[in-house]
Image: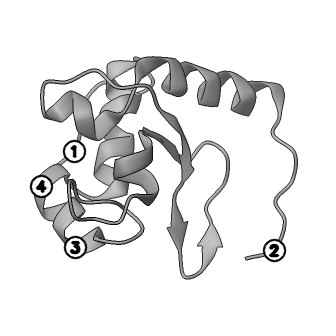
Amino acid sequence: MGPSKPPTKAEREWMARIADLGCVACRKDGESTPASVHHIVQGNRRLGHLFTLPLCQPHHQGDGHRVPSVHFAKRTFVQRYGSELELLAGLQVEFGIYDKVVT
């Protein structure tokens, strides 16, 4: 993964908005936890600054023992919370970017 381009104003606004929301996985568990921005990666490439999720440290880069983390227990994370793209689609619907999630 090479360096990414600096985020545009719209991308910075998206990332600030999702980080303010708190961890998307903790929210599914009925909790509210501060989050940092996680860039979704496919094929060892970041998809871009708009393809990001808010995750707390344990769900983002934790060791996967206490809670499933996207980096170290991805299969368990996906089974429990859904794929990263599904979580992103849910946020886009929540923020009114799209009308509904297509299943």
Identify the image quadrant of the N terminus: bottom right
The reply, left or right, for residue 93 in relation to residue 79 is right
Residue 56 location, quadrant: top left
The residue singled out by tag 1 in the image is 102
Circle on res. 80: 4
Give the residue at mark 2: 2
Q: Nearer the viewer, residue 62 or 26?
A: 62
Decide if residue 101 is on the left or right side of residue 79.
right
For label 1, the SS is: loop
- Residue 44's spot in the image, x, y percent? 60, 80
Whole-angstrom CA distance, mark 3 to mark 2, is: 25 Å
Residue drawn where x is 23% and y is 61% of the image: 77
Give amino acid for label 3: Arg
Q: Which residue is at a point 83% across and 34% down the rendered structure image? A: 8
- Residue 75, which numbered label? 3
Rendered residue at 27%/59% (across/down): 83
The residues tagged by marks 1 and 3 sit, at their Cα atoms, a distance apart of: 22 Å
- Mark 4: few/some/many CA within 10 Å (<14, 14-19, 20+): few
Residue 10: give x, y in percent of width and height. 73, 26
* Marks 1 and 3 close (CB-CB < 8 Å): no
